[in-house]
Image (cartoon, grey):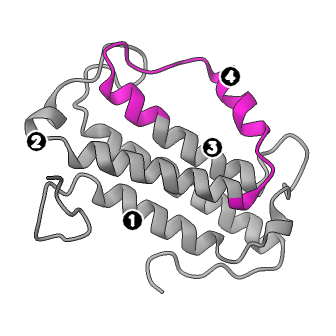
Amino acid sequence: MPADSNNPNQGNHFALPVKQSLQFLSRTCSVFTEDDSEYAPSGGQFTVAQHVAHVAQTIDWFMEGGFRPEGFDLDFAQHQTAIRQCNSLSEAMLWLAKSVDSAAAILDSKSPEDMLQPIAEGPVMGGEPRAAVIAAIAEHTAHHRGSLAVYARLLGYAPPMPYMD
């Protein structure tokens, strides 16, 4: 039975930073409405919805690349195409929730020994322990959380502190 990663006194704790990243990003995004989905400060930049979709896709990408024998999928043009098609914040948030749930399930199933196994050789994290994807997910999500906080302020919103209600 998988450990309850919401309980710090139980389990392996690998999923906790990923779940916390979702909580923090969700607080920042709480100021947006669905009408803000397609907002971007200028042409060519990710919209609000695309930022969230990109975070979701990247969580999936880190989990796949960190644990599969061939490593990371480096077809970034294909990744961009999928992101650019997202025009709904609510759909992007659902994608993000599913990505976090999937990542948490995978991480909860891993032993410390599993997490110390090396990521497949390649230009992205090759040879690092699989556990490195956890920090990478948290850092990447924080980067986009900051961008979304700027977008919110440009729209006249005051995003709440991400670390508490």
Q: Tell me which label, 2 or 1, sits earlier in the chain.
A: 1
In contact (CB < 8 Å): disc 4 and disc 2: no
Magenta highlight: main SS: helix
Of mark 4 and mark 2, the one earlier in the sequence is 4
Horizontal side of 118 relative to 18 (left or right) equals: left
Instruction: Label 2: state its secondary structure.
Output: helix
Residue 20: which disc?
Answer: 1
Q: Amino acid at mark 1?
A: Gln
Decide whether residue 56 is among the magenta residues: no
At 89% from the left edge and 50% from the top edge, which residue is drawn? 42
Q: The disc labelled 4 sits on which kind of residue?
A: Gln
Q: Is residue 24 left or right of residue 19?
A: right
Q: Earlier in the sequence, mark 1 or mark 3?
A: 1
Q: Earlier in the sequence, mark 2 or mark 3?
A: 3
Q: Are marks 1 and 4 in contact (CB under 8 Å)?
A: no
Q: How many marks?
A: 4
Residue 60 shown left or right of residue 113 in the figure: right
Helix or strand or loop: what does disc 1 sit on?
A: helix
Residue 65 belongs to the span the image colors magenta: yes
Q: Which residue is mark 4?
A: 78
Q: Which label number is shown at residue 138?
A: none
Give the residue at mark 2. 112
Q: Earlier in the sequence, mark 3 or mark 4?
A: 3
Label 3 SS: helix
For disc 1, the neighbor class at 10 Å (few under 14, some 14 to 19, many from 20) is some
Give neighbour class at mark 3: few <14, some 14-19, many 20+ (Cα, 10 Å). many
Q: CA distance from mark 2 to mark 3?
A: 29 Å
In what element is the residue under mark 4?
helix
Residue 54 has which mark?
Answer: 3
Note whether 119 is above or below 55 in the view shown.
Answer: above
For marks 1 and 4, give the CA distance. Answer: 28 Å
